[in-house]
Amino acid sequence: PSRVLSLFTPSGRPTLGNLLGALLPSARLLPTADCVFGISDLHALTSEHDPARLRERSLELAGLAIAAGIDPARCVLFLQSNVPAHAELSYLLESTAHYGEMQRMIQFREKSERQSAVRLSLLTYPALMAADILLYQATDVPVGADQAQHVELTRDLAARFNRRYGPVFTLPRAVHPPMAARVMDLSDPGAKMSKSVDSPGTIFLLDPVDVVRRKIMRAVTDSGTSVAYDSEAKPGVSNLLAILSATTGTPVAELSPGSYGALKKETADAVIALLEPLQRHYATLSADPATLETVLRTGAERARERAASTVTAAKEAMGLLAA
Ligand code: AQP
């Protein structure tokens, strides 16, 4: 069976983009694949953060992942910082990667432009992400389109390492959902919906449903009146169609709202129908944080066991002596 690895970063409150692009597609793989899912709290340290809020968000994200269908009884669900092998392998991969290729990453270029003091870990982030994936010898990495470049870099690093030091790593591939691989901001359909960008066009998974409806009804559409999928000419309408298609599981070609107003209403209804049960499930889970913490502790133990042999093999291959 395929081995799946996916990570979700508690760098903000999770959005509809995270849900449609990664959480739901990951949950769908549970019945057929061997799945490891991490809350990547170390990745949340790459930009300015508040420690108290990070603690809350890590637990919140774990609860939301479970509420979205990532059942910890059927996968390994853990906090990245609880498994030291991630940071350890990351250093070995920093020593495999080149400065130039890290600097060329689109996410680094975009995020570093928005910050006055750029943390060094923002530059080296793709090496840690490569470690996350390679530690578990993952074959498939379900991600939104924004992460495609990082998975490609992971492949390059794995291949380079294997050529130079011997066959230690499995080469992974990114798997994108057929629809909504890149959910755009509702108020600015030229920009990706992002959890760390404060925008009225971002739908957060824990937004009250009336807020969700209002945000969708106020979504920017395009000039003209015809409802057609054309992401170049009609980015706003196409984004709503993609969201509606992904939330209902209906191909875009079979969707036929008669007007922009009808499209917004159908999309709002569909998103709310998806979020309501998720929010109810999350409310039950978050009422009992001790159980959630136990789930993550058990997950970390299992992840540590799984990760150990890869990191040992990588160290040995690079010439580091065993203790
Ligand atoms: N807008 C999006 N559409 C589809 N998929 C998306 N993902 C993120 N935004 C969208 C996917 O969600 C998964 C978890 O991503 P992450 O937590 O690592 O965050 P990210 O990719 O860095 O994007 P965010 O949520 O916008 O966070 P910030 O603002 O901190 O960068 C990934 O599979 C991602 O592709």
Image (cartoon, rainbow, N blue to C red):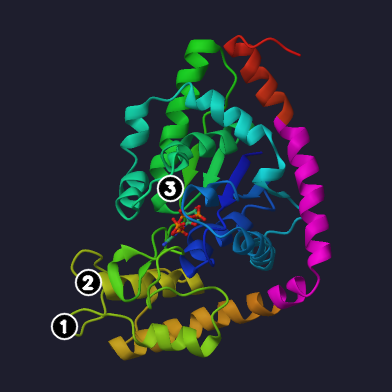
Q: Which disc number belongs to residue 147?
A: 3
300 sits left or right of 39 in the view: right
Q: Which residue is mark 1?
A: 224
Q: Is residue 284 above or below residue 213?
A: above
Q: Which disc number belongs to residue 234?
A: 2
Query: Does the Cβ of the disc 3 residue fall within 8 Å of ligand 1?
Result: yes
Decide which of 14, 276 is in the foreground and name it. Answer: 14
2 and 3 marks in contact (CB < 8 Å): no
For badge 3, the amino acid type reads: Gln
- Tell which tag, 2 or 3, sits nearer the viewer: 3
Q: Position of residue 59 (x, y in %)?
A: 69, 62
Q: Is residue 121 magenta?
A: no
| Other residues around mark 1 within 10 Å, as few (<14) / some (14–19) / many (≥20) | few
- Which quarter of the rendering shows the N terminus? top right
For badge 1, the amino acid type reads: Gly
Q: Which residues are magenta?
A: 281-307
Query: Does the Cβ of the disc 2 residue fall within 8 Å of ligand 1?
Result: no
| Other residues around mark 2 within 10 Å, as few (<14) / some (14–19) / many (≥20) | some
| Other residues around mark 3 within 10 Å, as few (<14) / some (14–19) / many (≥20) | some
For badge 2, the amino acid type reads: Lys
- The reply to whether residue 318 is visible in this rendering is yes
1 and 3 marks in contact (CB < 8 Å): no
- Tell which tag, 1 or 3, sits nearer the viewer: 3
Picture quadrant of residue 27? bottom right
Predominant secondary structure, magenta span: helix
Q: Position of residue 108 (x, y in %)?
A: 36, 45
Specify which label sits upstream in the sequence, 2 or 1. 1
102 sits left or right of 4 in the view: left
Secondary element at image label 1: loop
Q: Is residue 296 above or below residue 312?
A: below
Picture quadrant of residue 54? bottom right
Q: Position of residue 266 (x, y in %)?
A: 43, 85
